Amino acid sequence: MSSPERYPVRVMVTDVWDHVPLSVDDATTVSQLKRDALRTALRQAEVHEPDYVVKFRGARVFDESISLGTLGARSDSPFIVLPARRQPVR
């Protein structure tokens, strides 16, 4: 049995203004992508994930249990992880 084909995606985490490259497959869920990107970018083992949302192709992904394959992600697809609440401008 062969393992699922993995491909790279780019995730911009706005809290640190950094792109996180991740290797995913079509079965990876949006919530897994968000968790991995936040842990990598923020360098923390535990992050309060409900405080963040994911955008793909400019639109918020409301159902984070959906797989990336179902969402239509491909190699080098860009995602954005940003705070769920707007941040005050200083």
Image (cartoon, helix red, strand yellow):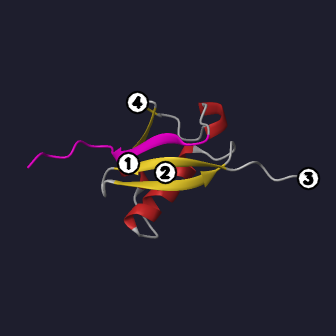
Residue 34 in percent (x, y) is at 49, 51
Dot 2 amino acid type:
Lys
Dot 3 amino acid type:
Met
Q: Is residue 27 above or below residue 42?
A: above
Dot 4 amino acid type:
Gly
For label 3, the SS is loop
Q: Which of the two marks, 4 or 2, is nearer to us in this view?
A: 4
Image: magenta residue range:
75-90
Q: Mark 4 or mark 3: name the one nearer the start of the chain.
A: 3
Residue shown at the point (87%, 52%) measured from the top left = 2
Residue 4 in percent (x, y) is at 77, 49
Q: Mark 1 or mark 3: name the one nearer the start of the chain.
A: 3
Residue shown at the point (38%, 48%) measured from the top left = 52
Q: Mark 2 or mark 1: name the one nearer the start of the chain.
A: 2
Q: Which of the two marks, 1 or 4, is nearer to us in this view?
A: 4
Residue 52's disc is 1
Q: How much space separates mark 1 and mark 4, taking CA atoms?
A: 15 Å
Q: Mark 4 or mark 2: name the one nearer the start of the chain.
A: 2
Q: Mark 1 or mark 4: name the one nearer the start of the chain.
A: 1
Q: Residue furthest right?
A: 1
Find disc 4 in the rendering and name its residue.
58
Mark 4: few/some/many CA within 10 Å (<14, 14-19, 20+) = few
Q: Is residue 33 above or below residue 74?
A: below
Q: Is residue 44 above or below residue 48?
A: below
Q: Is residue 21 above or below residue 67?
A: below
Q: Can residue 67 be spotted in the picture?
A: no
Residue 34's disc is 2
